Image (cartoon, rainbow, N blue to C red):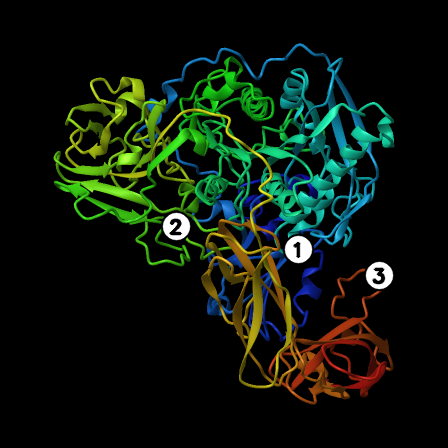
Amino acid sequence: MGRLIRSLSLGMVALLGVGALHANAATPALQSQKAEPPSSVAKGNNWDVTPVASGYRLTLRLAAPAPMRASLPLLAVDGVPIGVARQSPDQRTLTLLTTDPAVLKARDVRLIWSGDVGKSTGRNRSQAAGPTDAHWLKAKQGPPLTADPGALGKYQVDTAEYNLGDEAVYLPGLGQRSEVRGKVYTPRGAVGPRPLVLLLHGRHQYCYGGDELTPSDKPWPCSGGAKPVPSFRGYDGPAQALASSGYQVVSISANAVNAYDGDVYDSGAQARAELILDHLALWKKWSTIGGGPFGRTFVGKVNLQSVGLMGHSRGGEGVARAAVLNADRGGQYGIRAVLPLAPTDFARATVPGVAMSVLLPYCDGDVADLQGQKFYDDTRDSVTGDNAPRSTVTVLGTNHNFFNTEWTPGQSEAPSGDDWFGEEKESPCGAKYAGRLTAKEQQAVGTAYIAGFFRLQLGHETKFLPQFDGSDARAASAGRAVVRVVSQAPLVSRRDVNALAKALPAGSVTGKASATVCAGVTQPSGRMAATPTCMTTNDWANAPHWGTAWYAARTPTTAVTKLSWTGTDGVLRLNLPAWQRDVRRFAALSFRAAPDPAGAPKTDLSVRVVDGRGRAAVVPVSAVSDALVRMPGRGDSGLPKNLLRTVRIPVGSLKGVDLRDVRAVELRTDRVARGSAYVSDVAFSSPGVGLSAPARLLPQLSASNVTVKEGDKGTKSMDFWVTLSRPSIRPVSVYVETSGDLGTAVGDVTRQLVFKPGQVRQKVSVPVTGNTRDSYDLPFNLVLSAPREGLLNQSFGHGVVIDDDATPTLTVGNGAAGEKAGAVRFPVKLSAPSDKIVNVFGVLTDGTAVIRKDYLGEYDDGTTPPNRTVEGYVEPGKTVGDLPVRLVDDKVKEPAETFSVKVQAVDGAEIKLPVTVKATITDND
């Protein structure tokens, strides 16, 4: 059952009630007499809150392993998420440190997931149709492609696997050893070196079968008869399509990363990137000198200067990080194309210089906030002169799991499930909804876009350009899928008019209209800037552009212009300078747009293009795009998504306008009397492959690691250094913020650093408050995010505040009580107060008193032999506590009796062990 529960999605543990997964084995009679530990300031059946030096430690214990999801595990107190939890290796215990006083009055603590914030995780999904659902069921399809990238090519495909062992390589980003295992797809008879496409699965259960409910501190390799889940075998569709067209493909396994990334500072992105580069190093050897499992089979057959990476789920963040890590290391491998599929983006990374297409499944029930959208948003203007193309591909009716056959029921070897588990016919993501794709239909769409992207970018097969240029051209194998593509053409074939991310010059907006720059959502976003918010929502799943990133929570999100109007005379005018006016070489005028969710579900604008002689061409947005039609859904469970989509007007359709002398582009409110819409990224462009290569010439940003002693009083400065690998001729900026369990000792720091040309280091000072009480060392991170004109290298600076106070000594005294008292308490005393919970562990020994007849062990559940364990506590901040032992109040007249406790272990204090203390029980009969 344990491994199956790992595959459940959408907060099923919270839905079922973690305590309901198995019952307490203690007998009622003995259970009712169990002494309560005095250390908790709040507690429930399976959770407790204990004070520590840095605030409070919140611990949730699950009856079965938590489900394996791409989203981050959060602990929610009374329905409000408090922060990201660390997971134990067996996935059963989640902990976090917090200073939030809400935990002191907690009534309920649940595990929820970052992708589910703000929405119900129950089965009562939206039952009524949304106002625009009918439109999307019959949505306009783009023109057909001349060739189908999802169809098999001319080559037969040979497959093989390699397995160098479950612990074949050490991954520094994981601190553990990983398997090196892959499935290889080779075009039979292809000659010469061919591009290599590497596929990486995401975070899913890693073992199944066997002794699943036995906790283990070493979850990988699989033990107890369990087998590895073969997630790497789940991409046969795109692998076969690519290999049969002449591409070399390998799909690699990352189960070790999945097993250990619950307690890693970046949730495994660095480790996944390292694993990818380790596999590429093997392929470099196998394709040059041979060896390993393939001998000389691949010598001269693989081109490591033409590499594409596809990463699914957390694998998407892994391939994005791998492209940057490769550039940081000098661009040894020619990683030229990256496709994150339903990816996570926990720390707001950018991927400049490399062609990128982000595939977003509209019904993603795991990464429901579609946070991979930020890869596009953050990268699109992050580097001057970046000539790589990028796009997003939103596919309606598709979920998170079914792109991988090993994550699909009826196709997988291990247990699997639909991450969007609603069965209703009315919800646009329900399993019975007319617009929901079957698993095979979804896999066909994935194959068409994965294969088409890499054939375009690695093979320069330009017949697939219309698939990614925003015109929504479709492959025959994509079937009935409704797909919407947003595209940023390469700089060489693009002329940006206005990103609409900054306030417009005075006079740009006239009539009954207003234009306001906005970013983020109202609550609970922790935005850094004072920019007005774009929308009001607690459900980040419906705001992919503007929801926060959990490891960079205060980095500002995408800024756009919100155009609002109350009349048909409103005009937003963008004037073109003289050097921009000749647009004859471009194929289209485009921008991104979406309706304001607070307004009507459908709205419209006119686009008016004016030349130097005042002649104009007018095109209604509704004539060329449904970007101003709200996406499907009723306003529940993260739907509808508020995604900016493409408005694309062919330049050839601007009849009567002198394309050599275009003076202005206007957005007019003449179509609808009242409305509001988001607009962004106005540009003229033509489709193009561009130039994609590792961005090795960009300076690399790194944060130092810092360790300081806490000190006894006052506040000291903990100085991190953020450095550039070399001086830049342009200003380089990056956001920095403290992240993690800061408690009360570490100050919260958030700022944007700007490096002037020639400057290579800046100091970031974090305040640390000292005290004289013994406490825990406090680790935290300084996170770098959303860089401009640079690459992230060491993007997490690790800070540790070392407690430098003496550990107090402990004494334990004898105890005495009447049997009617219910318990005898051995006094426990510290030489000085501590910020730690001091735990005392001992074993009971009979004297004249006999266990179960006169007293009971702490965890005695009635089985044979009796449990003789006893535990005591001293709460943080106090010097006295006790070690309680339960007494049995019999009705027999008897003399005073004794038993003893042998104290064998103490945590949090100094004492010479073992120590034996005696208890005296006096009779009351």
Residue 670's disc number: none
Instruction: Kindly state the secondary structure of the residue where label 1 is placed.
Output: helix
Q: Does the CB distance between marks 2 and 1 fall below 8 Å?
A: no
Q: Nearer the viewer, residue 722 or 528?
A: 722
**Label 3 or label 1, whichever comes before in sequence order:** 1
The residue that label 3 is drawn on is 864
Towards the viewer: 536 or 746: 746
**Residue 448 image position (x, y, % from top left):** 55, 20
Residue at 48% x, 13% y: name it. 145
Residue 869 located left or right of residue 331? right
Q: CA distance from mark 2 to mark 1?
A: 27 Å
Q: Residues within 10 Å of mark 1 (few under 14, many from 20)?
A: some
Residue 881 in view, yes or no:
yes
Q: Residue 170 placed where, x, y %?
A: 78, 49
Give amino acid for label 3.
Answer: Thr
Q: Crowding near pointer 2: few (<14 within 10 Å), some, many (20+)? A: some
**Which of pointers 3 and 2 indicates the residue nearer the eye?**
2
- Label whose residue precedes the other's in the sequence (3 or 2): 2
| Residue drawn at (40%, 22%) of the image | 471
| Dot 1 amino acid type | Asp
Pair 3/1: label in front: 1
Q: Give how far across and how far down residue 281 sits, in percent.
A: 76, 38
Residue bearing mark 1: 263
Q: In this picture, is 1 found above or below 155?
A: below
Q: Which quarter of the figure has residue 337?
A: top right
Q: Position of residue 168 (x, y in %)?
A: 82, 43
